[in-house]
Image (cartoon, helix red, strand yellow):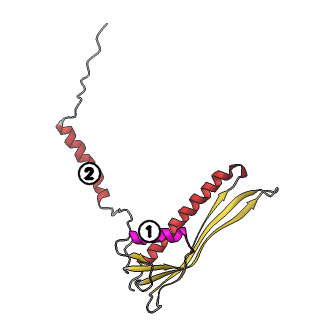
Amino acid sequence: MPTPPKILIHPHPTAERRAWLLAMASLAAAPLAGCGFQLRGAQELKFRTVQLTGFKPYSPLEKELRRAINASKTTLVVDSGGEAQAVLEAVTDRRERNVVATTSAGQVRQISLRVRFSFKLRAPSSDRELIGLTELLLGRDISYNESEALAKEQEEALLYREMQTDIVSQTMRRLAAVSAV
């Protein structure tokens, strides 16, 4: 029986092959280098200090907004109005939950979740409005089944957190757009 031919496999690529692979990878990555992609970082605000007012005690939206403002490199949240260059006043900070659909037996099948936040930004000394009354409203619909009540409760909490984070992001973009205090 004839012996099969021997195939020589080099365990290490040659220097030429490595250089060729490196050149091809560089060429493939070159168009991506100039695309301008950059992760969104903390917003830079035009005022150094801001006071948050009008929020309910222990408001999760106020806590997240405070964290986002303090994460910016330019602005800090202060508790005293005398120190603040701007005052963000929460007019509405509300979570809503409504039944949208039920079965003929009266069992809930679909729920609508909403987060409503309205605010204005003003200069504390002159009461001049920097941002007029602005309302942000986000909503999500979820299906509901009583046999999965605990899982649906957790899904509801997750959706509220996601909507709250989105509202904080939208608010920060509006604050960053303020030109002068």
* 63 in magenta: yes
Residue type at mark 2 is Leu
Residue shown at the point (64%, 64%) measured from the top left: 113
Residue shown at the point (46%, 71%) measured from the top left: 66
Marking on residue 102: none
* Label 1 crowd bin: few (<14), some (14–19), many (20+), radius 10 Å: some
Which of these two is toward me, 122 or 166? 122
- Residue 94 lies left or right of residue 123; in this view the side is right
> Which SS does the magenta portion mostly show?
helix
Q: Look at the image and tell me in which quarter the C terminus lies.
A: bottom left
Is residue 135 at all visible to an observer of this figure?
no
Residue furthest out toward the top? 1
Residue furthest out toward the bottom? 126
The image quarter containing residue 30 is: bottom left
Which of these two is toward me, 101 or 28? 101
Query: For the magenta stretch, what is the residue range?
Result: 56-71
Q: Look at the image and tell me in which quarter the N terminus lies.
A: top left
Is residue 49 at all visible to an observer of this figure?
yes
* Label 2 crowd bin: few (<14), some (14–19), many (20+), radius 10 Å: few
Marking on residue 27: 2
Rendered location of residue 82, percent (x, y): 42, 86
Residue shown at the point (44%, 73%) measured from the top left: 173
The image quarter containing residue 83 is: bottom left
Q: Which residue is mark 1?
A: 67
Count of numbered tags:
2
Residue shown at the point (23%, 28%) measured from the top left: 10
